[in-house]
Image (spheres, grey):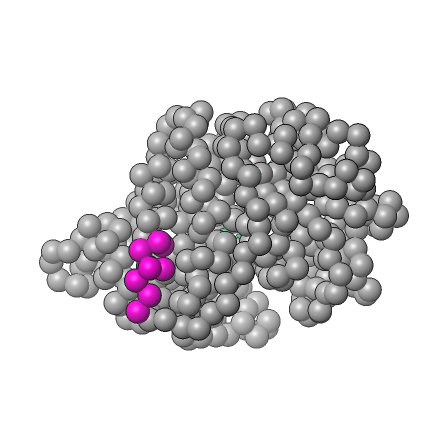
Amino acid sequence: MQDFTFHNPVKILFGKGQISSLAQEIPANARVLMTYGGGSIQRNGVYEQVVDALGDRSVIEFGGIDPNPKLEMLIEAIEIARANEVDFLLAVGGGSVIDATKFIAAAVHFEGDPWDILAKRAPICSVLPLGTVITLPATGSEMNRFFVITKEVTQEKIACGNEQVFPQFSVLDPETTFSLPARHISNGIVDAFTHTVEQYLTYPVNSPLQDRMAESILQTLIEEGPKTLAHPTDYDARANVMWCAAMALNGLIGAGVPQDWATHAIGHELTALYQLDHAQTLAVVLPRLLQVKQDSKYAKLLQYAERVWGLSAGDEKSRIMEAIELTTQFFESVGVQTRLSHYGVDSNAGQIIAKKLEKQGATNLGEHQDISPSDVEKILVMSA
Ligand code: NZQ
Ligand code: ZN
């Protein structure tokens, strides 16, 4: 096992009716900026529950945050937070709202261009405290230190991690997700699955506990994902998927093991250029990436084939190919297509993205830093 530091300070308030617990988590005299997206929380009753829980605290609202949150819009939120001397941020929504709120928290006291926090990894000194009410199980943003922001003018989508933006608490009430359209539940299953794979399907470092935790998340998603799609208000199935999504990217399964993240890096480019949903990009990239990198991932792919898909007979190469095929079929069975052509992306996307990554200096992706722009092109051509 590799050396590691593990730190996760996020308090999780899980279950029905937990939104009311906000009252105990946010100081009574806080000046709160409440952030949300395009209106789902007003339609499903979450907004009312949050407003009730906040009671007579001073609250300013900033709504309308789009999926794949944009810098251009968040600048306005930063100015509102500054002008009103906000001292607590409450994000209510999916990963986009939470990521946007982490960025606002980091930017309010930042001197200079806030984009530098992402593009130049500029150090941030004082970050506003934040809490979240997550309404879409997918990203794990509710329990991690990552945020992903897009600069629309330059078509850049950049991920960043900072210990200071961990939420202080997150409310996970599975009932808030009952109103989700199937597309976003499907996306969430694929996103959590891919987060797990990015930290698991690399090379062995003798980490049986992390491996088995990762395999448990994958198997639970394979079992519970279809159930929650078929029965959207089955509380238990939704609760299980919600906890999988949080566990997949809260640092635990990635502690002490090599990590890949090339699928995500390529995926962010696909979203920035062609506006695919985040999970759609992962479903397109991951199976072909596993195929291209099968030699360097050989031992873990065999383990994945056996322990996740029950493939232990036949020659090793065909087991690996079968496991990759079953992964593709799983993504499609939960409603996320795995071919670029399905999303109307033309066949030169591979070349365009390879060039863009080269220009950014992102020429060495993956756990061995051996995924070059030409590999990326190959992967995307195979995914056409
Ligand atoms: O905007 P509203 O009206 O709220 O509608 C949203 C949005 O249209 C809707 N929605 C959310 N909860 C709902 C609901 N509709 C009905 N009922 C509910 N309960 O769902 C739509 C998509 O929401 P979004 O937040 O964009 O989805 P997701 O949670 O998948 O977040 C995607 C973003 O997170 C980033 C992605 O790159 C993308 O920008 N990621 C963040 C990560 C992190 N912070 O750790 C890691 C991930 O790999 C990912 O990169
Ligand atoms: Zn993701």
Residue nearer the viewer, 19 or 29: 29
The answer to whether residue 340 of the structure is visible from this angle is: no
Figure quadrant of the C terminus: bottom left
Q: Position of residue 290 (x, y in %)?
A: 34, 61
Which of the pair 360/232 is nearer the observer? 232
Residue at screen point 50% across, 67% down: 5
Give 49 or 380, whichever is nearer the viewer.
Answer: 49
Q: Viewed as shown, does residue 139 lie left or right of 199?
A: right
Q: Quadrant of residue 114?
A: bottom right
Which percent across, then down, holds residue 123? 71, 69
Residue at (40%, 30%) from the top-left corner? 236
- Tell me: residue 142, above or below residue 290: above
Q: Main secondary structure of the magenta part?
A: helix
**Is residue 150 shown in magenta?**
no
> Can you say which quadrant of the picture contains the N terminus?
bottom left
Q: Quadrant of residue 362?
A: bottom right
Number of marks? 0
- Apparent side of residue 245 relative to residue 361 in the rendered image (left or right): left
- Is residue 209 inside the magenta stretch? yes
Report whether residue 226 is seen.
Answer: yes
Q: Quadrant of residue 330?
A: top left
Question: Ligand 1 is located in which of the four quadrants?
Answer: top right
Q: Residue at x 79, y 62 (%)?
A: 110
What span is in magenta?
Answer: 206-214
In percent of width and height, residue 146 lies at 58, 57
Residue at the right extreme, as displayed: 83
- Residue 33: x, y in percent? 76, 42
- Front-most of residues 130 and 327: 130
What residue do we see at 74% from left, 49% from top? 74
For this view, does 83 lie left or right of residue 75? right
Q: Residue furthest left?
A: 314
